């Protein structure tokens, strides 16, 4: 047996390619990518992950606000809706912008709320499913 025979024990490039593919395919979102998720992660809509960690999120995770995993177990539908519509009702000093109203804001260029009632409903549905 030559001292080099051990080399043949190394897996082939085909093996590595296969292993890599399996590894990459496990790097997907664990969370469902539904409409609520899309709104929450869209920079021009909810952009919730600028402040919150979302379940299944990978990479850089903001901790300005609490992680939203388990939000559906901690908070009722009503509370979730209140947070998203106008977090100032829950904490007057909050950093979280009101997504459902545009009252009491300064220097906004539009009277429109950030999200429509329908979009808020989608976001709340997704939050409620995170238990
Ligand atoms: C600018 C930062 C910021 C953004 C953007 C933001 N939040 Fe928040 N949010 C906070 C902070 C900070 C809190 C902690 C409560 C407080 O304000 O004291 C919070 C609290 C919450 C809570 C209550 C969590 C708990 O466990 O009590 C929910 C639910 C929530 N946010 C949902 C959302 C959703 C959904 C979005 C996007 C549509 C969003 N937030 C966008 C900063 C933000």
Image: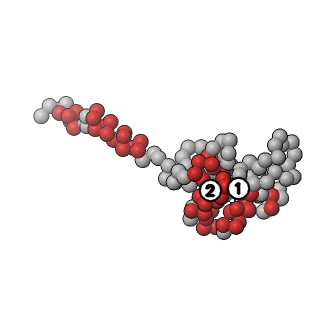
- Identified at 56% across, 43% down, the residue is 59
Residue 45 x, y percent position in the rendering? 68, 45
Residue at 66% over, 66% down: 77
Classify 10 Å Cα crowding around label 2: few (below 14), some (14-19), many (20 and above). some
In this rendering, does residue 102 appear at all? yes
Observer-nearest of 30 and 84: 84
The residue tagged 1 is 117
Looking at the rendered image, the quarter that the N terminus falls into is top left
Decide: few, some or many residues near mark 1? Use Cα within 10 Å; few <14, some 14-19, many ≥20.
some
- Is label 2 in a helix, a strand or a loop? helix
- Left or right: 20 in relation to 55: left
Residue with the mark numbered 2? 122
Label 1 within 8 A of ligand 1 by Cβ: no
Image x and y of residue 2, in percent: 14, 31
Which secondary structure, mark 1? helix
Place residue 14 in its image quadrant: top left
Q: Which mark is residue 62?
A: none
> Residue, x 31% and y 37% (percent of image)?
16
């Amino acid at each position: 047996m030559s001292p080099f025979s051990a080399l043949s024990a190394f897996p082939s490039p085909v093996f590595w390619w296969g292993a890599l593919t399996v590894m990459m395919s496990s790097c997907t979102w664990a969370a469902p990518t539904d409409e609520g998720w899309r709104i929450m992660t869209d920079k021009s809509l909810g952009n919730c992950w600028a402040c919150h960690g979302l379940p299944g999120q990978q990479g850089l995770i903001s901790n300005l606000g609490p992680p939203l995993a388990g939000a559906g177990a901690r908070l009722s539908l009503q509370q979730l809706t209140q947070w998203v519509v106008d977090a100032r009702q829950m904490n007057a000093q909050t950093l979280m912008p009101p997504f459902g109203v545009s009252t009491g804001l300064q220097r906004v260029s539009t009277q429109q709320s950030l999200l429509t009632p329908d979009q808020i409903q989608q976001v709340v549905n997704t939050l409620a499913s995170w238990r």
